[in-house]
Amino acid sequence: VQLQASGGGLVKEGGSLKLSCTTSSGAFSSYVMGWFRQAPGKEREFVAAIIWSGSSTLYADSVEGRFTISRDNAKNTVWLQMNSLKSEDTAVYSCAARTSFWRPAAVAGIGSYDYWGQGTQVTVSS
């Protein structure tokens, strides 16, 4: 399964960006989808996840209220709308797909995902 993330770029603090992740996989509508990020010198961390139907989402505390994850199964696409960006949001953002069931305790874990896309760089300037 190939996942393609895009939409990164350079933005000033307080600005917005919308990331996209698409796949040609015919099973997209059954996947839990997640976004993760990795800042320079830091470990990869969970950002947000969304259940296959879109009816449940989970966010890291650091982005709650600022970021919104959504999906359109007809388009095989998941998005991450990022508002009120801060310099500490600077990182490489990657999308990932989980083929197992939705479980909040699990979907925030890097090891819970089966497929990963390449990252897209987000740089927030102060």
Image (cartoon, rainbow, N blue to C red):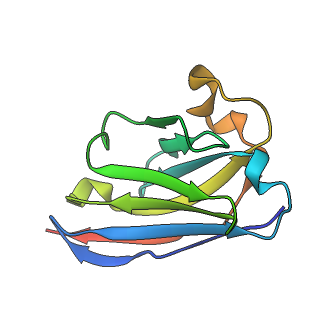
x, y (%) of residue 6?
Answer: 54, 75
- Whether residue 119 appears in this view of the structure is no
Location of residue 110 (image quadrant): top right
Q: Which quarter of the picture shows residue 76? A: bottom right
| Residue 96 left/right relative to 80 | right
Q: Is residue 27 above or below residue 23?
A: above
Residue drawn 31% across and 39% down? 64
The percent coordinates of residue 104 (x first, y second) are: 57, 24
Quadrant housing residue 3: bottom right
- 54 or 84, which lies in front? 54
- Residue depicted at x 59% and y 47%: 34
Residue 32 location (% of width, % of height): 68, 42
Q: Indicate the quadrant containing the N terminus: top left, top right, bottom left or bottom right.
A: bottom right
Q: Is residue 114 above or below residue 83?
A: above
Q: Position of residue 80 (x, y in %)?
A: 45, 59
Across the whole image, how many numbered discs are drawn on residues? Answer: 0
- Horizontally, is 37 left or right of 114 in the view? left
Q: Quadrant of the C terminus?
A: bottom left
Q: Is residue 122 above or below residue 29?
A: below
Q: Residue at x 42, y 55 (%)?
A: 39
**Residue at 53% in and 34% down:** 56
- On the question of residue 71 being in view, the answer is yes
